[in-house]
């Protein structure tokens, strides 16, 4: 076997019986990773990068859903996918939830990020990208682990009255959630969720590209859980056997707070006898 000497070559060349075969040798993600390293390495190594990535992703997603909420009032084609089509999101709802989210990030998240930037050395980045299977299985593993951690946290903060009143009740001020309710949280809950999102890829020894992928996926599915919409293409309508909870089951949790404690999957609530669902029909 001979290999191309350039880093842009991602194939091994095999010669057998005077016949040449070219087979994939490196990860299909390697060209993407090489591009990121060549052009954005200083940015990627900064301790501020994960914070900026997560905040910008969240802002983009809630902006999309908030535009839908505003348009849904006068657009039946959008409103028919709302779980509660008779109810509209008001500007007061938007300003209230956005205000607490901004406060939490300015008072807690931003100072912590600046502290990391000042005192933590830049992160060393590996030259090799993860294989596609490592990338996808890493994200799945982190999601399963996070789902279990939050299920236990969530269950305890509902069953123990002091924990509920002190830390979690604020999130349940809205019994019909919309996207901005995703981070309408106490500082303790926001920090806990951020801690698991950061630590779980480390525990599973994931590549940093996998860690960032999990972070983006986690933000997306968390926002989708609270979006207040039941689209036919939503993940809970695509994953078979009801394994994925999604927005409908999490909306049911806000309606019936002692049910559906798991944030993403359904199996823990099945096992714990705490599952509840509402079937949404498109009208």
Image: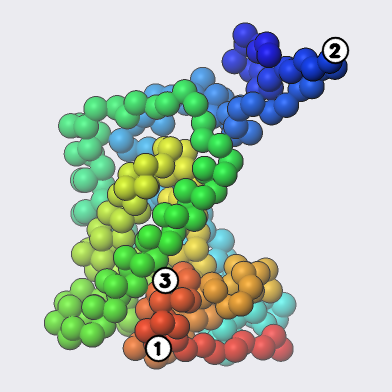
Foreground mark, 3 or 1, reads 1
Residue at the spot 61% in from the left edge and 77% down from the top edge: 241
Q: How many marks?
A: 3
- Tell me which corner region of the image, top left, top right, bottom left or bottom right, holds residue 280: bottom right
Q: How far is the residue under mark 2 from the one under mark 3?
A: 56 Å
Foreground mark, 1 or 2, reads 2
Q: SS at mark 2?
A: loop
Q: How far is the residue under mark 1 from the one under mark 2?
A: 64 Å
Q: Is residue 64 visible?
A: yes
Q: Are marks 2 and 3 in contact (CB under 8 Å)?
A: no
Residue identified by numbered label 2: 18
Q: SS at mark 1?
A: loop
Relative to 41, is 161 above or below? Answer: below
* Circle number at residue 273: 1
Where's residue 170, x and y in %? Answer: 27, 77
Residue identified by numbered label 3: 263
Where's residue 154, x and y in %? Answer: 30, 75
Residue at the spot 68% in from the left edge and 11% down from the top edge: 2
Residues 147 and 169: in front is 147
Where's residue 211, x and y in %? Answer: 42, 44
Label 3 vs 1, first from the N-terminus: 3
Where's residue 107, x and y in %? Answer: 21, 54
Relative to 121, is 84 above or below? Answer: below
Residues 106 and 23: in front is 23
Residue at the spot 60% in from the left edge and 89% down from the top edge: 279
Residues 2 and 238: in front is 2
Residue at the spot 18% in from the left edge and 83% down from the top edge: 160
């Amino acid at each position: 076997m001979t290999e191309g000497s350039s880093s842009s070559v991602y194939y091994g060349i095999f010669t057998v019986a005077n016949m040449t075969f070219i087979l994939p040798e490196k990860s299909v993600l390697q060209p993407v990773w090489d591009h990121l390293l060549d052009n954005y390495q200083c940015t990627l190594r900064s301790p501020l990068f994960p914070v900026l990535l997560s905040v910008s992703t969240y802002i983009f997603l809630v902006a999309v859903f908030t535009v839908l909420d505003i348009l849904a009032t006068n657009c039946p084609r959008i409103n028919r996918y709302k779980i509660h089509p008779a109810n509209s999101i008001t500007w007061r709802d938007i300003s209230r939830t956005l205000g607490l989210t901004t406060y939490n990030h300015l008072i807690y998240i931003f100072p912590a990020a600046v502290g990391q930037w000042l005192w933590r050395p830049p992160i060393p980045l590996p030259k090799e990208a993860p294989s596609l299977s490592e990338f996808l299985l890493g994200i799945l593993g982190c999601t399963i682990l996070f789902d279990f951690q939050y299920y236990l946290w969530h269950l305890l903060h509902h069953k123990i009255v002091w924990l509920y009143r002190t830390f979690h009740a604020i999130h349940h001020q809205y019994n019909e959630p919309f996207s901005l309710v995703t981070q309408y949280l106490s500082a303790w809950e926001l920090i806990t969720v951020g801690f698991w999102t950061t630590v779980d890829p480390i525990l599973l020894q994931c590549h940093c590209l996998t860690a960032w992928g999990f972070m983006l996926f986690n933000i997306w599915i968390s926002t989708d859980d609270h979006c207040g919409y039941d689209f036919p293409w939503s993940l809970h309508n695509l994953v078979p056997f009801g394994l994925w909870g999604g927005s409908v089951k999490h909306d049911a949790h806000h309606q019936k707070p002692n049910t559906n404690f798991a944030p993403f999957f359904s199996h823990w609530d099945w096992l714990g006898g705490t599952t509840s669902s509402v079937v949404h029909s498109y009208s």
